[in-house]
Image (spheres, rainbow, N blue to C red):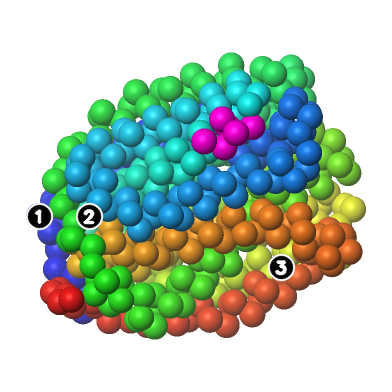
Amino acid sequence: MRPGPTALDNDSRPRDLLALGGSFFFIFMGSATLQQFAIPFLKDVRGWSEARCYWILPTVYFSQAFWRINAVYVINLIGNRAAIILGALTYLLFAGGLLLCPNYPLLLAILLAWGLGASLLWSAGSTQAIQAAHHTRYGQTAGLLYASVDFGFLIGVVVLTLVYARLGPGMLWAFCLPCAGLGVLATPLIPRRHLKAERQTLGNLRDILVSPWAIAVCILLLFCSFAWGIMLGSLPDWVKQEHGIGSFFALLPFYLGRLSTDLLGGRLSDSKGRGKVLFGAFLLSAAGMLSVSIWHRHLASILVGTAALGILFSAVPFTTLARIGDLVEPSKRQIAYGAIFIWRDLGVGISVLAGLYLRNLLGGFQMLFLFFSILFFLLSLLSFQVGRGTKLPAEVTK
């Protein structure tokens, strides 16, 4: 059984997805793409220690994890569109802070604020996109929303790599701040929808998190986020050491893998099943990390490995979002989104740090990538559990 469609579901309004996608495209192209360059930038420009640099992004994701559960209170208080606008402003704040702020404690405070804003942007934006979609196209809709983000990432990485290599890191602001600003200016075009979420209770959270499909997807989100953590920490750091900053182009297959999976995987998950898409994504990522481990000094293996990681990091979040649409009542979707996606944020933060400390523990990058290959293979065996599930009850009592 599926949750009953809302009036918004029946209307199937493409304007919501178009406005959300356009705004997200510019915001992520100009701001979030900087995550890929944060560690090299802070080392080169600020001269900070490796530990300081590696703690920057986990600060964001641990803050975002905390606010995932609590974002529903803010969204109910100020409204869905206002939450998206506020969240977008913090992305612009992050870009300005990273590029222009030389004070480490102040930058950490900016990152904590960005964690709140990111949770608002994604919780409010994702649930609005799903509730504007027909119930047979949840996977396609989630994939298209993520495609707008990943297309922004793809263009941003290309431009920032060129700027970094040819003009120097001090000129990154000239691209990032105007693009992120355009994304913020586009947010008022997002239709105002009254998507009142249920009051969050322990009963709501319990019913969501004890179901077998939710347990499985939380585990998969936690560890699939290691793909993004690897891309933010260990892989770019290693590529720069071995091949120079210009070789960041070798990381582009990650974004091509994400974009192609967004566009094709959503339709596949609607037609073939959520679990099958996840199984294939984890197997491919395991093979990709194995290739990087074996042929770690060859850029060709980086191309294969990053593409596989991109497929994984795309498939799990949009499949999870679609599964929430499948099985969770509209009034509970923001609560479910927060309770489940908290594990994604924890996974990113943990894996960025793990790349630093596990690398030393395991004896270098080669063994680190082999470790991730084995982990992703084991997780592929759990993926079919996501395809099983029943609708959560419409009414929850304490």
Which residue appears at 84% of the width and 60% of the height? Answer: 360
Give the quadrant of the N terminus.
bottom left
Residue 136 as seen in the image, left or right of residue 147: left
Disc 1 + disc 3, Cβ < 8 Å: no
Q: Which residues are magenta?
A: 104-109
Mark 2 sits on what residue?
131
Q: Is residue 393 above or below residue 197?
A: below
Q: Is residue 253 above or below residue 304?
A: above
Q: Position of residue 181 (x, y in %)?
A: 43, 22
Q: Nearer the viewer, residue 300 or 28?
A: 28
The residues tagged by marks 3 and 2 sit, at their Cα atoms, a distance apart of: 35 Å
Residue 127 as seen in the image, left or right of residue 271: left
The residues tagged by marks 1 and 3 sit, at their Cα atoms, a distance apart of: 44 Å
Mark 1 sits on what residue?
7
Quick one: which residue is furthest to the front in this view?
A: 105
Question: Which callout, 1 or 3, points at the residue further toward the start of the chain?
Answer: 1
Which residue appears at 65% of the width and 24% of the height? Answer: 102
Q: Is residue 162 above or below residue 349?
A: above
Mark 3 sits on what residue?
372
Between marks 1 and 3 in the image, the one whose residue lies nearer the viewer: 3
**Residue 101 lies in what quarter of the image?**
top right
Amino acid type indicated by mark 1: Ala
The residues tagged by marks 2 and 1 sit, at their Cα atoms, a distance apart of: 9 Å
Residue density around tag 1, few if under 14, some if 14–19, many if 20 or more, within 10 Å = few
Amino acid type indicated by mark 2: Gln
Residue 106 is one of the magenta-drawn residues: yes
Numbered disc 2: secondary structure: helix
Q: Position of residue 148 (x, y in %)?
A: 44, 41
Numbered disc 1: secondary structure: helix
Question: Which callout, 3 or 2, points at the residue further toward the start of the chain?
Answer: 2
Q: Nearer the viewer, residue 261 or 43?
A: 43
